[in-house]
Image (tube, helix red, strand yellow):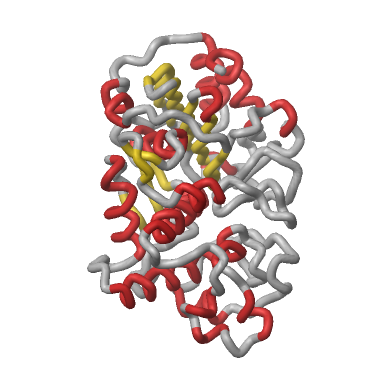
Amino acid sequence: MRSVLFVGLIGLVLGLAAPALAAPCDEAAAYSDQRAGVSVLVLKDGQVVCERYTAGGEPTQGWELWSGTKSFSGLIAAAAVQDGLLSLDEKVSDTVPEWRDDPRKAGATIRQLLNLTSGLSTTIGKPPVYDGAIATPFSAAPGTRFQYGAEPFQVFGAVMNRKLAAAKTGDADVLAYLHRRVLGPIGAEPSGWRRTAAGEPLMPQGASFTAREWAKVGEFVRAGGTLRGKPLVDPAAFMAQFVGSKVNPAYGVSWWLPGVGGYGPRGATSDFATHAAELPGDLVIAAGAGYQRLYVIPSCGLTIVRQAPIPEATRDETPAWSDFAFLTPILKGWC
């Protein structure tokens, strides 16, 4: 993902007045609506060019991002690198002593944890509590297999909580840190964030945002991790989010990328690999079940949000989703 000039977040707020009606907006919104969509929001150079709501969606209604939540972990890691709390290539076992006696667990790094190549076994569905994730066995050596699921992000939550406690930052937990370091400064407010039975923030799922608030996160990413022209997080760690692993070039540090590689379950990603050559090379995606989407394309000046409720979006009778089909009119109109 190439660096771009910062577009002030104030422009996002000011640009939320009546969006211009345009054929690309009509086409993209119709495609989303036919697949149980509730919101479509497109920003071009920080200004709203398309904003549509249907089937109960509205500007103030937050929707669960599901696995779109995962991509916040990359932003947290980039902030933590800037604060000297961690490095992406340090061993998880430096902070989690429970892993030190297992030869495979002992060598896994934070980067591998967040690009899902640590070797940790994973499951799709209800995430375990942090201690349960830490206790999960490995099923591969670090760096040898891409395994999509919840456990790595729960382990990362535990790592951050322990580091924050040791550093005495005053943050109650990893979610408080995310608010203080990123969401608060860029003015993005979640509608909610679910926690485990133990009260721990769910890191692989659980965040709810309105389309407008999630778009602010996208604008921050489009700005290269800067705020008012200055880095809000570590620049190198920020860029590392958008570099795929050798095992899976289509997944970076918690963000999906358009390329040939392994993808997650139905609803997480779809046809990025098939159409990778036809998509902008700097496209990055936060994606969740039900085809929750935050697309960021710096070279086109675009931030795009699409939301839909579960189970409606994943019913068998709901037409199949294609990211390429949804993006095509938007790219033709504004890229």
Toward the viewer: 164 or 147?
A: 164
Q: Front-most of 312 and 97?
A: 97
Q: Position of residue 272 (x, y in %)?
A: 69, 37
Asked if residue 157 is positioned above or below residue 184 in the image, the reply reads below
Relative image position of residue 221 (x, y in whole percent)? 45, 39
Residue at the far left in the pictured view: 170
Q: Looking at the image, how many numbered discs can be counted on the residues?
A: 0
Asked if residue 281 shows in the view, the reply is: yes
Q: Position of residue 267 (x, y in %)?
A: 60, 45
Residue appearing at x 51%, y 41% in the figure: 292
Q: Is residue 21 above or below residue 85?
A: above
Residue occupying the point 71% across, 53% down = 248
Residue 34 sits in quarter: top right
Q: Is residue 53 left or right of residue 252?
A: left
Q: Give the residue at x 45% y 24%.
A: 42
Is residue 319 at least partly visible in the picture?
no
Quarter holding the C terminus is: top right
Task: Measuring from the top left, give residue 137's x and y in whole percent.
Answer: 63, 80
Instruction: Find the residue positioned furthest to the bottom.
Output: 101
244 relative to 7 in the view: left or right:
right
Tell me the quarter of the image containing the N terminus: top right
Say which of 33 and 279 sits in front.
279
Q: Residue at x 36, y 69 (%)?
A: 200
